[in-house]
């Protein structure tokens, strides 16, 4: 049961907006029973659909204010058969507040009330965007490409939130989720976070690239590859978000097996085969030739590895001299990434018609002297992948523009 002051606020809200009583109470509660903030939020959420209600409101308020002055002359006119009513006296409405510079009504007169009300309604989304601002301390305000580079340097995930000021869920996220101290701690420990508002170019780019159908949306990205790891739409409770982020809090991008050369090559140096399967483009520029995805967990834990398997293709000595690396931009070149047992990640260009033996020689040359006599095999870094056959070409084996892992044949 509402007390008298809150009941009056609900009545005032309904009088201004024409909303239903239940909607009025919900909006006022969301805004901490601040009438002006609630009115702005209501118009921000309903947009131009409230225009007809505003017109009716303006006419009703004008009629009520001038009703007393009109009653006498109109009654007399009705008795005399004269339908001409008295002139409407000029009047001035003022709305007083503690902060008149924040979009409140300015003095208007007569028929100017409707114009001022429409002007306020059009500005309401911008005002509402500031009503529940996201805490500045958790934002890393950079374009997405720069955010990815910084996160990669710090070995953190990228978390982006695309919002629309017209969507109430966007304001609810700022108010309930991003202001939560536990959520802020989770973000600070594991990721770099930023918000992008529709219709900015960054928000449009993210929405297009990651197939966003509805806002607000929260997306977790691998900073090295630009790969989307998780996506959630709409309101999220702090508890659900922390649970959602748990895998990322315990596994940084480097531990998840993402690989990317630290020095990104310009577009002019990308190989024609950069669009092959097994690669993933960055969000800023779709340069798939520079990006290779490696799933460490899947390759190590789920692949069926047995000693002696495909021993004909195991290697313990270089099977042929390693050819010179082809220049960047060669029409028949490709890029291959390799993860070694000691955790190092390498990348090199090869010609697609070269044999897999070249990959074996390259891998052997990168091993420490103490392990060069151990037999090993190369396979794609995905569950159930078979060892590469040394007689195949790099192209036919599927190794072109892919990520490989070196596994010891004689055990861990």
Image (tube, rainbow, N blue to C red):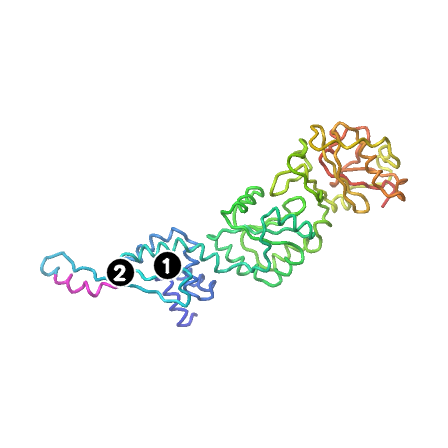
Number of residue marks: 2
Is 225 on the left-hand or right-hand side of 102?
Answer: right
The residue drawn where x is 64% and y is 40% is: 281
> Is label 2 in a helix, a strand or a loop?
helix
Q: Taken as a whole, is the magenta stretch helix, strand or loop?
A: helix
Q: Is residue 303 above or below residue 244?
A: above
Which residue is labeled 1 in the image? Answer: 17
Is 64 on the left-hand or right-hand side of 153?
Answer: left
Q: Kindly indicate the quadrant of the structure image that contains residue 323.
A: top right
Q: Is residue 89 above or below residue 382?
A: below
> Is label 1 in a helix, a strand or a loop?
helix
Q: Earlier in the sequence, mark 2 or mark 1?
A: 1
User: What is the magenta range?
Assistant: 60-76
Which residue is labeled 2 in the image? Answer: 62
Q: Kindly indicate the quadrant of the structure image that contains residue 127.
A: bottom left
Is 147 on the left-hand or right-hand side of 260?
Answer: left
């Amino acid at each position: 049961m509402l007390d008298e002051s809150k009941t009056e606020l609900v009545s005032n809200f309904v009088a201004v907006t024409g909303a239903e009583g239940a909607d009025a109470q919900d909006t006022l509660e969301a805004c901490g029973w601040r009438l002006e903030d609630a009115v702005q939020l209501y118009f921000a959420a309903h947009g131009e659909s409230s225009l007809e209600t505003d017109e009716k409101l303006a006419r009703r308020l004008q009629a009520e204010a001038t009703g007393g002055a009109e009653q006498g002359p109109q009654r007399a006119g009705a008795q005399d058969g004269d339908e001409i009513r008295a002139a409407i006296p000029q009047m001035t409405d003022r709305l007083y507040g503690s902060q008149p510079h924040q979009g409140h009504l300015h003095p208007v007169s007569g028929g100017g009330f409707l114009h001022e009300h429409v002007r306020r309604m059009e500005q309401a989304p911008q005002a509402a965007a500031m009503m529940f601002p996201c805490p500045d301390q958790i934002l890393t305000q950079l374009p997405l490409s720069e955010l990815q580079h910084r996160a990669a340097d710090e070995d953190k995930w990228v978390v982006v939130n695309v919002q629309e000021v017209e969507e109430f869920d966007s304001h609810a996220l700022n108010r309930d989720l991003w202001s939560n101290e536990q959520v802020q701690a989770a973000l600070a420990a594991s990721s770099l976070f930023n918000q992008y508002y529709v219709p900015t170019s960054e928000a449009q780019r993210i929405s297009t690239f990651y197939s966003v159908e509805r806002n607000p949306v929260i997306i977790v990205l691998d900073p090295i590859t630009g790969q989307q790891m998780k996506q959630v739409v709409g309101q999220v409770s702090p508890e659900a978000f922390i649970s959602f982020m748990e895998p990322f809090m315990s596994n940084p991008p480097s531990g998840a097996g993402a690989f990317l050369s630290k020095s990104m090559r310009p577009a002019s140096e990308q190989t024609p085969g950069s669009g092959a399967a097994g690669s993933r483009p960055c969000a800023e520029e779709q340069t798939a030739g520079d990006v290779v995805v490696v799933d460490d967990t899947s390759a190590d834990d789920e692949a069926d590895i047995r000693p002696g398997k495909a021993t004909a293709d195991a290697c313990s000595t270089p099977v042929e001299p390693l050819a010179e690396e082809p220049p960047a931009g060669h029409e028949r070149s490709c890029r291959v990434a390799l993860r070694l047992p000691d955790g190092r990640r390498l990348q090199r260009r090869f010609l697609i018609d070269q044999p897999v033996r070249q990959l074996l020689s390259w891998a052997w040359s990168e091993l420490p002297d103490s392990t060069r006599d151990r037999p090993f095999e190369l396979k794609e870094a995905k569950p159930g992948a078979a060892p590469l056959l040394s007689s195949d070409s790099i192209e036919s084996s599927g190794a072109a523009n892919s990520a490989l892992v070196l596994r010891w044949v004689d055990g861990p």
